[in-house]
Image (tube, rainbow, N blue to C red):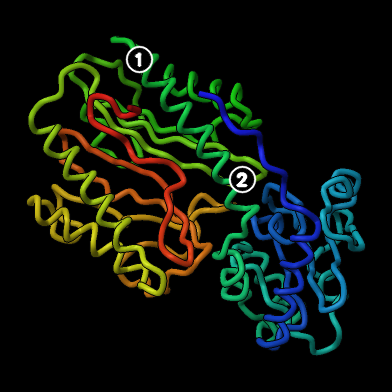
């Protein structure tokens, strides 16, 4: 399979547009500044990709500027990552970075916090600023991040094309006796060969009864003829995630495996058909569960059946709001991106999960990747 060329990364102009939109929301909500921690939102607005730790590296977004905050010994590295201009403020190891954040605010200013900041950081800020001046920036940030641009969708499309081809190669490589861990290593290598610089962002490989565990087993297992194989893996391109699951038989499948595989395919198709602009996210989950009940699974989360939500949002985080789950009444809108994976679990026997992602357009959903073809020939 020949992959299309990698799309360009997110541009500086797009990041500036995101910041402009955030500042508009800040003004509406009465926030004078937003503090971004070492989270995916820091990357979303500024281009700085940074792993979280006990040391604060982040950014204060003001109405008229950005202040970056980082330990002094990280200055040179952080300066190479910035995708939106701003002053870099540093602190030494014996200093408190939250005092520095407080000092950059005007008297009485209200600071909205990245919802993924750790609790200890909130407490330090409350000690310097006062809890009454701290707001939740989560709703503002989420309202922007949930609607993906064309550039974001292009990056995810490329990531998912890579992972789908890795799945095909893994399927073709399987041999009796191979260990699940060996397959996971093969998948990581193929992700790298096809252009994902970090290899697999995660990888679940399960054989036989281990497939009934939604997030895979802790123990390793050898592949046996007649096993169900479940592989769930993904990669990142410019930070944007793929996440695809394929389930198929190694050798001859039983009639029960075929029945469950086909029921899962119907549930996935029902969810896709229900995803219309303006429809609540929870309605998509309900459609998948209704299809499962028609085949004798469930109801609700009862097993045998689907033990988890039908799907999750996806972007810079592999799991993002909103979700396709009961209780999430967010209306579907163009630019939203979701997984579609109403897994069927038969406890102690096997599990079947088809997972593909779709994005919403003004006229309805579109697949990033085509769903599996059949139990025996999932890639056509």
Crowd tier of the residue under label 2, counting other residues whose Cα lies within 10 Å: few below 14, some 14–19, many 20 or above? many
Q: Position of residue 9 (x, y in %)?
A: 72, 46
Judge by depth and name the residue closer to the eye, 87 or 219: 87
Tag of residue 108: none
Q: Position of residue 261 (x, y in %)?
A: 19, 37
- Relative to 31, say whether 228 is above or below: above
Q: Which residue is label 2 attached to?
A: 155
Q: Position of residue 182 (x, y in %)?
A: 43, 16
Q: Which residue is label 1 attached to?
A: 174
Judge by depth and name the residue closer to the eye, 115 or 262: 262
Q: Identify the residue shown where x is 63% and y is 28%.
A: 195
Image side of residue 221 versus residue 348, left or right: right
Q: Position of residue 256 (x, y in %)?
A: 9, 33
Label 2 to label 1: alpha-carbon separation = 29 Å
Judge by depth and name the residue closer to the eye, 87 or 166: 166
Crowd tier of the residue under label 1, counting other residues whose Cα lies within 10 Å: few below 14, some 14–19, many 20 or above? some
Give SS at disc 1: loop
Image side of residue 267 versus residue 87, left or right: left
Query: Which of the two discs, 2 and 1, labels the residue nearer the N terminus?
Result: 2
How many discs appear? 2
Give SS at disc 2: helix
- Relative to 112, say whether 242 is above or below: above
Q: Quadrant of the C terminus?
A: top left
Judge by depth and name the residue closer to the eye, 189 or 370: 370
Q: Nearer the viewer, mark 2 or mark 1?
A: 2
Q: Identify the residue shown where x is 87% and y is 45%.
A: 80
- Relative to 144, say whether 110 is above or below: below
Q: Identify the residue shown where x is 75% and y is 67%.
A: 17
Q: Identify the residue shown where x is 79% and y is 71%.
A: 61
Q: Residue furthest front?
A: 363
Asked if disc 2 and disc 1 are in contact, CB closer than 8 Å, the reply is no
- Relative to 247, say whether 140 is above or below: below
């Amino acid at each position: 399979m020949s992959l299309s060329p990698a799309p360009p990364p997110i541009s500086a102009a797009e990041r500036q547009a995101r910041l402009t939109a955030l500042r508009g929301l800040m003004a509406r909500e009465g926030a004078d500044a937003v503090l971004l921690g070492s989270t995916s939102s820091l990357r979303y607005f500024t281009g700085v990709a940074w792993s979280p730790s006990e040391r604060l590296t982040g950014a204060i977004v003001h109405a008229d500027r950005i202040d970056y905050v980082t330990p002094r010994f990280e200055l040179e590295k952080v300066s190479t990552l910035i995708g939106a201009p701003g002053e870099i403020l540093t602190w030494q190891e014996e200093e408190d970075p939250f005092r520095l954040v407080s000092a950059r605010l005007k008297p009485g200013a209200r600071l909205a916090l990245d919802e993924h900041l750790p609790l200890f950081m909130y407490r330090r800020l409350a000690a310097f600023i006062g809890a009454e001046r701290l707001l939740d920036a989560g709703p503002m940030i989420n309202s922007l991040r949930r609607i993906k641009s064309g550039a974001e969708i292009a990056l995810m499309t490329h990531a998912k094309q890579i992972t789908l081809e890795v799945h095909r190669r893994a399927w073709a490589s399987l041999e009796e006796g191979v260990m699940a861990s060996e397959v996971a290593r093969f998948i990581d290598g193929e992700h790298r060969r096809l252009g994902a610089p970090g290899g697999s962002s995660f990888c679940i490989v399960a054989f036989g009864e281990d497939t009934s565990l939604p997030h895979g087993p802790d123990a390793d297992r050898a592949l046996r003829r007649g096993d169900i194989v479940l592989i769930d893996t993904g990669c990142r391109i410019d930070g944007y995630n793929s996440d695809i699951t394929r389930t198929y038989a190694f050798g001859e499948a039983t009639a029960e495996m075929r029945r469950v595989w086909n029921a899962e395919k119907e549930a996935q198709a029902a969810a896709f058909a229900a995803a219309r602009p303006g429809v609540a996210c929870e309605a998509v989950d309900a459609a998948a569960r209704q299809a499962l009940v028609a085949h004798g699974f469930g109801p609700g989360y009862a097993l045998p059946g689907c033990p988890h939500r039908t799907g999750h949002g996806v972007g810079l985080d592999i799991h993002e709001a909103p979700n396709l789950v009961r209780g999430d009444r967010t209306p579907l809108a163009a630019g939203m991106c979701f997984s579609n994976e109403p897994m069927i679990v038969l406890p102690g026997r096997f599990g079947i999960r088809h997972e593909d992602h779709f994005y919403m357009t003004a006229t309805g959903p579109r697949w990033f990747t085509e769903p599996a073809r059949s139990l025996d020939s999932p890639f056509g």
